[in-house]
Amino acid sequence: MSAVLNETAQRPLLSVRQLNKHYGSFVAVDNLSLEIPEGEFLTFLGSSGSGKSTTLSMLAGFETPSSGEILLAGRSLVNVPPHKRDIGMVFQRYSLFPHLSVRDNIGFPLTIRKVPAAERKRKVDAMLKLVQLEEFAHRRPAQLSGGQQQRVAIARALVYEPRMLLMDEPLGALDKKLREELQDELRHLHRRLGLNIVYVTHDQEEAMRLSQRIAIFSHGKIVGLGTGYALYQNPPTAFVASFLGNSNFLPVTAQGNAAGTFEGNGLGMRPTPGISQGQGLLLMLRPEKALALSPSEARSTPLPAGWNELSAKVTELLFLGESQTCSVVTAGGTALTVKALSSAALALRPGDEVKVRWAIAEACIYDSWSADDLKKANSVS
């Protein structure tokens, strides 16, 4: 009996199996499989055209898969209409009824489901309290701010207690400060309700701020899946490294040594399976993992064991409030960025010679891309 209970507890709430969506010859979603456990906040992150919103639309029932399966708690959703899927949906455009009050907008899903008036009032009151809009219950959408309207849309999606909430760039139209406030509210709402949320965004910071896991989309596929921390610290591919956060890429050629490990162009590299002599590679380093030292600082501070050092010249310094960045170019012509907290002032100027240092263990190693791919990666960064 306990084995059966344990299997039930581990069963994912939502399973996507070999999902495809084609528009003629264009492949929008390409053989995608994914499992979402009960209570998770998962974000689909990707650029326009990557397949994230199309996937969300198929989960919601607004798009029909070309092939594949979608299961919610073991039940197939492929031929189930949107209003019978037990899934709530929140859009970037709030889609509120302008002629209805806040209360009636929130209660609309209950009205069309013919929920009795007393129960409908109780549930709408609970939602008004949850999104802190009790005093605005009788206003029309046009009398509300953008953030308040989005709260109404969220309450309307939650009022009939769906198993899952889908959100398609719901905060994209808001200014930065309000967006961050609503991100915090969404995170707290998720914790209080234990509700599954699948969230679509192209904003990396938003994905990191909200999610328990992030699925990174590219060309209709999930190319990275994991916690924000894991994807940032150890990106599975150079593309994921370039897309999530800022990255420095150094093209190197693997050179064997007597110890059987490899160095690239004289730079130490952390152990990486499958590297062969003469292989072209990319060394990826996050800007905040590097240090930029003046020649005098470098002379007075011996290079620690397990660190690399490159000579470079400063091209630009930028003050960004809590942090500052130093752009440099190496003797070989590779542009790099070093990031430091503003409290650790970089006493450098454009044209200064510097030594760029980093711990070997902090840099990831990937198969080399073409020169064009490297330019694209650096432009995404």
Image (spheres, rainbow, N blue to C red):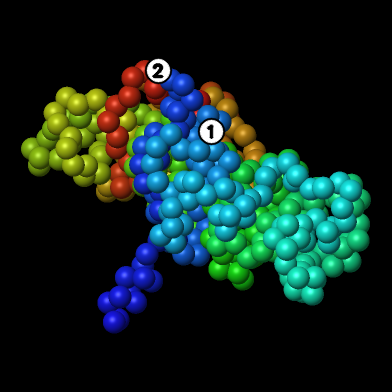
**Residue of label 2:** 372
Instruction: Look at the numbered disc 2 and give the secondary structure of its residue.
Output: helix
Kindly identify the residue that appears in the image at 45 percent across and 41 percent down: 216
Furthest residue toward bottom: 1
Q: Name the residue nearer the viewer: 270 or 99.
A: 99
Location of residue 218 by image quarter: top left
Q: Is residue 345 left or right of residue 301?
A: right
Task: Please report contact status of discs 2 and 1: CB closer than 8 Å, yes or no.
Answer: no
Q: Which residue is at 18% across, 42% downward?
A: 273
Residue 318, percent across and down? 62, 34
Tell me the residue at 37%/18% (across/down).
371
Q: CA distance from mark 2 to mark 1?
A: 19 Å
According to the picture, the residue beneath numbered tag 1 turns out to be: 47
Residue 354 visible in the snapshot: no
The three-letter amino acid code for the residue at tag 1 is: Ser
Q: 189 and 7: which one is in front?
A: 7
